[in-house]
């Protein structure tokens, strides 16, 4: 089965409730998967039919020939007084207020994950990637520069409010209004000026299930493809897993709290308090990449694929569907058959550690050296984090889901080193292959070591070398 067919098949994302009811044509009826588009909607005739349905609704108030999620959204947009001729999303946050708000928003931690799984590809594929808050305000927008300039004309800019009540039907606004993943294709947008564009969005939730915001991809028709829906869903799952891991690493706050309102339980595992003692442990940091330690059994070196699978399942305790695993395991995705075969082989290798449920999940807690590093970072112990961080996560892996874990952990360790006042922590980061040419870290070492010391002289010399080699200072980073 192709990726497109697999994604268009009726299926509920983890967290969705209710029976999956389908028509004889195999696509979900209203109320279950209204975000999925019929294949014919992308044809020229399908586009004309959407435009005709939109004109008919604006003229008569009668809506037919469109998906239920779109029809309901058009009605809400009309009741809210949205002008179909001219989108006017207010810029609710500007400049300093936006920067301050973003620095305190929990989704700031999602940026490395989104960058690794979506943004890097978006820059070359003609898409924009955006993150909103729970009220639909655009917090971050990045991607193809030409697309970004084009959509600025309809008010799709950082700080603007793209909730349905302001901007009409659009993927992030409608996703937040309905609480589920949504795709909006062309003329399904309520306002005419936005109809040249298409988009896919998923709601992002904190560990208690409360909406934090939405993840959106905007572009031409391909931005509302079946493959894009899988990519956005997989990225959203990765973001939520990272947020849960941060809660676990932080441990109990005042009066046993976690920083989130209430102690959630995911798949029977407490997320709020200290993590339960792990019955098994997975090492994925170099040099011990892919080693599984189980009680009462000798350590086993796993194949790279099995190590990838176990790490991804540990990072996503709610479980992953086959198509989500396919996107996270391979740059070009895998077939469902290949995923099932790999999971079956993993069960034979890992024994009872992998549950026989769908979606796929672990049968119990699995400790990882990744989580151990995160716990040290959360405790503010940079030295312990550096002790435990023995190298990149599964350095030979090219699985997108593993790469995002690798990049996020390296970024967090680097940030701890840069903020440390202890020169030893900085030097240990700089002695690693990852830190050897880290301009900012060498600058920081110059700043925290006394002039005339060996460490100060070494750092100054390395900066001179980098200037000669690179000819410039550190490059500006997207979303910084």
Image (spheres, rainbow, N blue to C red):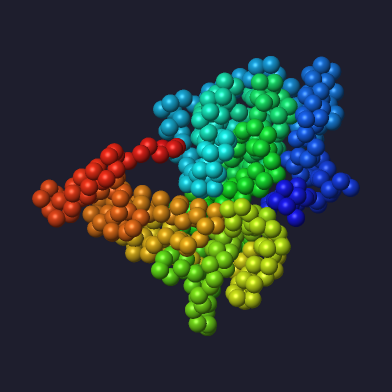
Measuring 81% from the left and 40% from the top, which residue is drawn there? Answer: 30
Q: Give me the residue at 55% from left, 57% from top.
A: 399
**Residue beneath the point at 25% across and 56% down:** 427
Please tell me whether residue 36 is drawn above or below residue 334 in the rendered image. above
Which quarter of the picture shows residue 348? Answer: bottom right
Pick out the residue farthest to the left: 452
**Relative height, residue 421 to residue 101 (above, below):** below
Q: Quadrant of the N terminus?
A: bottom right
Q: Is residue 124 left or right of residue 168?
A: left
The residue positioned 74% from the left and 29% from the top of the image is 188
Residue 362 seen in the current view = yes
Image position, residue 293 (x, y; %): 50, 75
Residue 443 in view? no
Give the image location of residue 434, x and y in percent.
35, 55
**Numbered circles on residues, count:** 0
Q: Nearer the viewer, residue 412 or 341?
A: 341
> For this rendering, which residue is in front, 48 or 139?
48
Whole-percent x, y for residue 163 in the image: 63, 29
| Image quarter hosting the C terminus | top left
Compared with 197, 379 (above or below) is: below
Give left or right: position of 96 versus 257: left
Which quarter of the picture shows residue 447? top left
**Is 169 displayed left or right of 448 in the figure?**
right
Picture coordinates of residue 318, whole percent (x, y): 63, 58
Left or right of residue 299, residue 463 in this image? left
């Amino acid at each position: 089965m192709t990726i497109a067919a697999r994604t268009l098949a009726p299926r509920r994302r983890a967290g969705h409730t209710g029976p999956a009811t389908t028509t004889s044509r195999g696509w979900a009826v209203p109320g279950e998967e209204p975000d999925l588009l019929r294949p014919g909607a992308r044809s020229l005739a399908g586009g004309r039919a959407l435009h005709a349905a939109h004109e008919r609704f604006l003229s008569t108030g009668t809506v037919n020939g469109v998906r239920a999620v779109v029809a309901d959204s058009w009605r809400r947009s009309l009741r809210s007084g949205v002008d179909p001729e001219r989108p006017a999303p207010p810029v609710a946050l500007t400049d300093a207020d936006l920067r301050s708000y973003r620095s305190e928003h929990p989704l700031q931690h999602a940026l490395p994950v989104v960058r690794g799984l979506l943004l890097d590809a978006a820059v070359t594929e003609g898409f924009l990637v955006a993150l909103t808050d729970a009220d639909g305000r655009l917090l971050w927008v990045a991607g193809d520069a030409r697309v970004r300039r084009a959509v600025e004309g309809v008010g799709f800019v950082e700080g603007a409010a793209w909730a349905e009540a302001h901007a009409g039907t659009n993927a992030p606004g409608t996703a937040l209004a309905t609480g589920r993943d949504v795709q909006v294709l062309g003329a399904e947008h309520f306002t005419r000026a936005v109809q040249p564009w298409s988009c896919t969005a998923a709601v992002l939730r904190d560990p208690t299930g409360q909406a934090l915001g939405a993840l959106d991809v905007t572009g031409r028709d391909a931005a509302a493809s079946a493959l894009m829906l899988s990519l956005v869903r997989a990225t959203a799952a990765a973001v939520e897993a990272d947020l849960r891991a941060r809660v676990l690493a932080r441990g109990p706050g005042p009066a046993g709290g976690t920083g989130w309102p209430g102690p959630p339980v995911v798949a029977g595992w407490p997320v709020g308090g200290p993590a339960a003692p792990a019955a098994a442990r997975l090492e994925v940091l170099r040099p011990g990449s892919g080693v599984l330690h189980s009680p009462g059994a000798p350590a086993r070196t796993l194949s790279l694929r099995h190590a990838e699978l176990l790490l991804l399942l540990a990072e996503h305790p709610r479980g992953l569907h086959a198509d989500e695993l396919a996107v996270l395991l391979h740059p070009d995705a895998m077939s469902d058959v290949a995923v099932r075969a790999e999971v079956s082989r993993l069960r034979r290798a890992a024994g009872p550690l992998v549950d026989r449920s769908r979606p796929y999940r672990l049968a119990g807690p699995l400790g990882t050296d990744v989580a151990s590093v995160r716990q040290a970072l959360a405790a503010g112990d940079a030295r312990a984090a550096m002790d435990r961080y023995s190298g990149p996560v599964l350095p030979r892996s090219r699985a997108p889901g593993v790469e995002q874990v690798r990049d996020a952990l390296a970024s967090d360790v680097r940030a701890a080193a840069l903020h440390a006042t202890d020169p030893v922590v900085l030097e240990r980061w700089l002695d690693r292959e990852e830190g050897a040419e880290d301009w900012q870290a060498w600058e920081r070492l110059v700043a925290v070591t006394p002039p005339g010391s060996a460490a100060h002289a070494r750092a100054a010399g390395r900066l001179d070398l980098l200037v000669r080699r690179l000819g410039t200072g550190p490059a500006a980073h997207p979303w910084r």
